[in-house]
Every structure is written in C-alpha cells, then in structure tokens.
Amino acid sequence: MKHALWVGCGILIGLFSTSSMADEKEPMGSVTFMIGDVDIQECGKTGWADAELEQSTYEKDKVKTQEESRCEVTLTDEKILRIGEKTVFEILREPDGNTKVGVKSGKVWMNIRSLVEKEQFEVATPTAVAAIRGTVYRLSCDTTYSSYRVYEGSVAVTPFKEDGKTLEDSTFTVNAGEEFTVVKDFEEYKRQQKEALEKFRKSEEEQLEEFRRQQREGFKEFKQKEEEAFQKFKSLHIELKSFDKEKDRKLDWVKWNLERDNKLER
C-alpha cells in the first residue's frame, strides 16, 4: 500500500513538473534602450505596466510608447526594432518558427541583417504585410496607410484586400533608396496630410515669410503627389518612388537610428 502511495505521489510530482516547464516561455527579446514613457502589456493581460530596461519580451506581448518617447527592442537573434512616439507593436512567432511583428500605428525602424537561409521575417500593418531579407528600413502606418523607406536590401510588400484580412495576389518589391506607400482610404489620407500641413504652419508662424514659401511648396508638392504620383490599384492607392537620402538623413528620427546602428556595429 505504501509502495503504491509513493508511486502515485511520484506521478503527480512529475505531472506538476512537466506542466510547470510547459508554462515557462522563452523570451523573444528584451528592451535595450528607452526614452520617455514606454509601456508593456503582457500576453493575456488587459492592463499596461511601465517597461523597464533589460526587461524580457515574450510572444504576443505588446509594447507602446507615449508622446516624445522611443524604445529599442533587441530580439534574441540580434534583430533590432525601434519604435517612435505613439506607436504600438506586437511580437509573434509563426507555427513554422519564423518571427512576425504586428504594428497597429506609429513608426518603426527595422535593422534585420541576420536572417539565416530560408528564415522569414514579416511585419504586418492594417494595410499590408512586408517580407524582409537582410534589410534596414523604416515604416510609418496607421489604419489608413503604410509607408516604407528602404536603406539597405529590399522589402516585398503585399497589400491586404478590402476586407483587411486577405492578401492581394500582387507583391511590390521596394529596393534600397526607394519609398513605397499603400493607402486604403485615400480621402482620409488626404485629410491627414492637410492636418500635418496645418500643424507645420502653426510651428512656423514666427518665421512668416519662410513659412509662406514652404507652405506654398508643401501644398504644391502634395497636390502633385495626389494627382499624379499615386496610382489606383484595385481598392487601394499606391506610390513607389525614390527618396532623397541626404535630405532624409537630416531628419531627427533617421539620424538617431543611424547613430544607434553605428554604435551597435562597433
């Protein structure tokens, strides 16, 4: 009887041990740099908690930045993701073991140079999915549009159909030095551009003459883009063009990311 009791206890202990091991998740990365207010929502929880430097991030965790905040997450295989202010993203692991990042809104810098053979890395936004191989690029998006600027390598972008769930049959390749924008709601996108112009106007009011010149140029540039550059693609509008690398490097977001990349490469 005692022997049977001990055997039963041993089985129970083994079961609890196995269950505990199954519950332990392997981290997919960690927070390696922060500026401002950064929050993390752990998988399965509804609330957000303050992120901490070197905090591990797991599958289906969400990371969110507040205004004037930035965050860098380094994945376990040395892939780098940086997010700007007012950005939300989620890290996922596909059934085949590949990594997928979901970005609902905001801006993200990707330094994905370390993919091994046949490995895939995808970034999904509300309007498209980008497949990456050995790439440095930046992304900005919301529910209306996604815009990609590629600095190294290439990105293959496949837009979602009108239902927002099914991918289109066509994929667009974006090479280094190119920018690709896919817009779901073109009227809303134009409204956002006008709001951005108004925000710029208010910030430049002290330099009135310079503002007037830049406002005219900005509005003219937008109208030209609206009428000529964007092409209708089924239910979407798309644009593929080259961008000015030297002018781009002067932007604070780009300059900061390039400096971070250079530090990591030393």
Image (spheres, grey):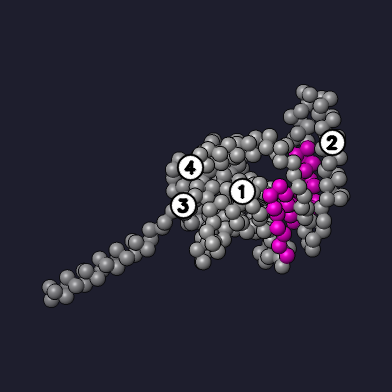
Q: Quadrant of residue 1?
A: bottom left
User: Which numbered disc covers residue 32?
Assistant: 4
| Residue where numbered disc 1 is placed | 136
Disc 1 or 4, which lies upstream in sequence?
4
- Mark 4: amino acid: Thr
Disc 4 or 3, which lies upstream in sequence?
4
Disc 1 or 3, which lies upstream in sequence?
3
Disc 2 or 4, which lies upstream in sequence?
4
Q: Determine if residue 144 is in view.
A: no
Which residue is painted at 64% across and 52% down in the image? 153
User: Which numbered disc covers residue 76?
Assistant: 3
Q: CA distance from mark 1 to mark 4?
A: 18 Å
Give the structural element (helix, strand or loop) at label 1: strand
Disc 3 or 2, which lies upstream in sequence?
3
Give the structural element (helix, strand or loop) at label 2: helix
Tag nearer the camera, 1 or 4 = 1
